Structure formats: structure tokens, C-alpha cells
Image: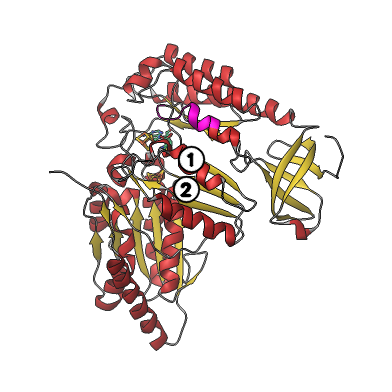
Amino acid sequence: MERKTVQITPQQIAEQRAYCDAIKRYWQAQKRTPLAFVDTYGCQQNEADSEHLRGMLQDCGYAICDTEEGADVIVINTCAIREHAEQRVYGNVGALVHTKRRHEGQKIFLCGCMMGQPHAAERIKKSYRHVDGVFNPHQLWRFPELLSTVLTTGKRVFAVEDSAGVICEGLPTVRQNTLKAWVSIMYGCNNFCSYCIVPYVRGRERSRAPQDVIAEVRGLIAAGYKDITLLGQNVNSYGKDLPEPMDFSDLLAQLAELPGEFLLRFMTSHPRDAGKKLFDTMAKYPKIAKQLHLPFQSGSDRILKAMNRHYDSAHYRELIAYARQVMPELILTSDVIVGFPGETEADFSETLKLIADVRYDALFTFIFSPRKGTPAAEMDDPTPKAEKNARFDRLVALQDGISAELHHDYIGKTVRVLIDGKDGELLTSRTEGGRLVRIKGDEALIGTFADVIITDNTTWSLVGKLKKEGEHG
Ligand code: SAH
Ligand code: SF4
Ligand code: F3S
């Protein structure tokens, strides 16, 4: 059976709006403003989805609060990427039994990637009976309808039908931040890296129409957003499924040409699909942050093959060399998995070598976690847990040393930052690469870009001073 992306129609969205109106009237009749709490686990994609959930809740008349205690509805947006993420969800959902007892009528929903796994949804249904509703990522747009059913019938709802994936334009959004915004440009993933659950729970790769993405970004710029991150599991395969195929670099260029002062970022890139055109585009436009998150996962070609990553470490190194050639100031980050099934000490040394050679600004490090239904979960895995932990510690120590050195190297340099807030007496700001810089200055500067000379560093942040006209860093 061929499975196709489902485009949610304006009619379907209108039906959901009608549910919102009905819920709003339900609360008006009770003469109070209900409270809603949305708790998010996992990646930026989930953060972006939670902003839509908050948007829908607001349209239903809820005020958004920041704790479970006293909330009339709790939505937990879950992540399934590693077992640890799931354990935290089960633990926290379990504890909600008591919260719910203290608040008559409280409704609890679970959604997100974990609920895209039938076995997890089933466990919630059977063993967590205080949960009122469950929906997987494909059903998110139907949340008002599900909430309405629970409120009006008191029955539990389970919307977990599988799908190749949906695209839904026009969902309301309540953004968490006034300067930084997420924009999903595509959903799902087709890569099936052998360790990864994402393609199973988020469906097939599908791209939003470029005009919809451009309109959203235009709107954000007009609303004063300065730091816009384009999201997708593999942004470099953006557009392949569109009626008129278009590639990611072209979309990026069109966005970077929009008027206004803002910075564009994107994640995540896959080394198989990222290439010269992307790096040339990044280099060409000042509005594209010189920051690249390019996960390598392992330095061993044997392991990369077993991971189904479709590149080898030589190709990866060539990509980095080219990116740095056209963007010498590039800030580079990556993901790495330690202890993939069958990883030997020799494989692991290749990973350490790659890290030492590339010298990343920061690394996101993970110990392999078997995910039910993925090929890697069935692979022979003779390495003891203690050995994996020891490797993990060695890797982290290596990276910490590199990060500290790179951090220290900032002193005396001039960097462009976006001033984004206040912390005590000082203003906080972020470099293009996302590093925290504290500076003295007037609060009125929040929301503006500035050049800053770095004067000092602590372990986690930099200290700087605003550069005056004509001053040299
Ligand atoms: N789409 C992105 C990453 C999404 S998941 C990409 O391909 O780069 C974020 C990171 O979690 C991955 O890069 C990987 O390093 C890690 N990860 C995914 N599945 C994992 C698993 N089963 N065990 C350990 N780490 C995992
Ligand atoms: Fe997972 Fe690989 Fe897809 Fe990233 S590219 S989401 S690691 S399957
Ligand atoms: Fe987790 Fe789903 Fe993101 S599994 S990492 S929330 S795509």
C-alpha cells in the first residue's frame, strides 16, 4: 500500500477552531479562566510543536501557566530518542496521580514521539489510568477536538493511528521567546539510521511549501524576531518531495534576502546531503549565522556503515575542510554516539581521533540506547556497560579540554552578538555560534545586535564590553 503525506485542509482547521470556540464557551459558562501547562521533552521540533499546543490552548480560552500544580489541563509532549528520556516521562506521569487528586477535574494528555510507539501508548492506556488522552505526532492538529471530547464525555481518548505524516498550515502559535523563533520547514525522516526511532514515530519526510515558510519568516521579522532557526531532521533534503522540487540552499538564500535585521540558523544537517552549495550559500549571506551542526555519530567507517549513515569519515572531513575554507569563523557542533553495538576500542579511537582533529566548539554526546523496533536494537552488543561508560568519560574529557581552549581563545576578539536579556547587573547576549556573553550596558539595547570585545571568560560564558565606533578588538 502506498502511503502519502496528508495535507490538512482549511475546512479541517476550521472544524478544529469550532471546537476551540465550544471549549471557550464551556469555560465562560463556569465564569473563570482555566489554566494549561505544557511540558516539553526532547528536541526543538518538539518545542515548536508545543508552541502550537499552547496556541490551540489559548484559542480554547486557557491561560498558559508554568507548573502542573493547579493546571486544568496538562499536556506532556514526550520524546523517545533514548530510554532515559522515556523513563523520565514515565516517572513524571506517575507522579501526576497525586497532582490530579489535589485538583478536581484536572485533565492529563500525553503526546509527542513516545506516543508514536504503539507499545508505549498501550502501556499508558493500561497502567496510567489517570491519563485522559493520548495522541501521536500525526494527530497534533486535532488536539482541540480531543480535548473537547474529554471535557464533554469524561471518557479517555486515544488518537494513535499511524500515518505517513501530515502537513498542517495555519495552526495557532504561542511563542516562548520574543526574539528567537523556531520554524519547521519539513517533518519526518527517511534516513532510517539503524539506531534511531524518529522515522518510525514522525513518519516520512515531507516539506512545507516554500511560500508558506517564507510567509512565516516574513511575519516573524515584521514582529521583531531576530534569531530564526529553521528546523528539520535533515534539512538538506528539504524540497525533494515538492511538486516543483527545490533545494534547501535555494530556500535559505531566498530567506536571507528578505529585508530586515535578523539571523537565520538551521538544524539538523546530514553529512550525506550537506555539500558545497550549502556552505557557499552560508558564506555568501551575512544574515545566515556561521554556525553548523553536522552530526558525525562515529569516526569509524565500519560503525558508520552499521549505522546506515551513508558517508565515511574521509567524506565527513572533506566537508568540514571545505566549510572552514569558505567560512574561517565557522562555529561547529556535532552529535556523537558512544557504544554502538559492536564498537571496539579501535573503532572508538577513530572517534576520538576525529574529535581531536576537527576540534568542535561543542559536542552533544550520547551513549547508545537500544530502541525497540530499530535494527540496532537487534544487533550483538558484547561491550559491557562499564566499558561504554568509561569510553564516554574519556570522550567528554577530550572535548571539555578542546572547548575550554577554544573558549579561552575568544579573549581579545570582537564578536557580533544579539543582546537578549538581563541577568543581575549585566546584559546577556549570544554570539552567532550561540555562546553566552555578559556585558555592561543599557537595558534598552535588548533586542539589538552589537559588536563586543571579549575581555574574559569563565567556564560556561564569556565576558565582554560593547565596542565603540572605531575601536579595535
Ligand atoms: N536528525 C538529526 C538527529 C536527531 S536525534 C540527525 O540526523 O543528526 C539527535 C541525536 O540523538 C542524534 O544525532 C544521535 O546522536 C542521538 N541518538 C539518536 N538515537 C539514539 C539512540 N538510539 N541512542 C543514542 N543516541 C541516539
Ligand atoms: Fe534519526 Fe538518522 Fe533521521 Fe537523524 S537522520 S532523525 S539520526 S534517522
Ligand atoms: Fe525526541 Fe522526537 Fe525530537 S524522539 S529528539 S522529540 S523528534
User: To which quarter of the image does residue 130 belong?
Assistant: bottom left
The x, y position of residue 70, in whole percent, is 47, 72
Residue 420 left/right relative to 388:
right
The segment highlighted magenta reads 272-280
Mark 2 vs ligand 3: CB below 8 Å: yes
Mark 1 vs ligand 1: CB below 8 Å: yes
Categorize mark 1 by other alpha carbons within 10 Å: few (<14), some (14-19), many (20+). many
Residue type indicated by callout 2: Gln
The x, y position of residue 300, in whole percent, is 42, 16
Q: What kind of element bears circle 2?
A: helix
Q: Residue at x 56, y 46 (%)?
A: 257
Query: Can residue 363 be spotted in the picture?
Result: no
Q: Residue at x 58, y 18 (%)?
A: 356
Asked whether 277 falls inside the magenta stretch, the response is yes
Name the residue that disc number 1 marks. Answer: 267
Asked whether 67 falls inside the magenta stretch, the response is no
Name the residue that disc number 2 marks. Answer: 44
Ligand 1 is in which quadrant of the figure? top left
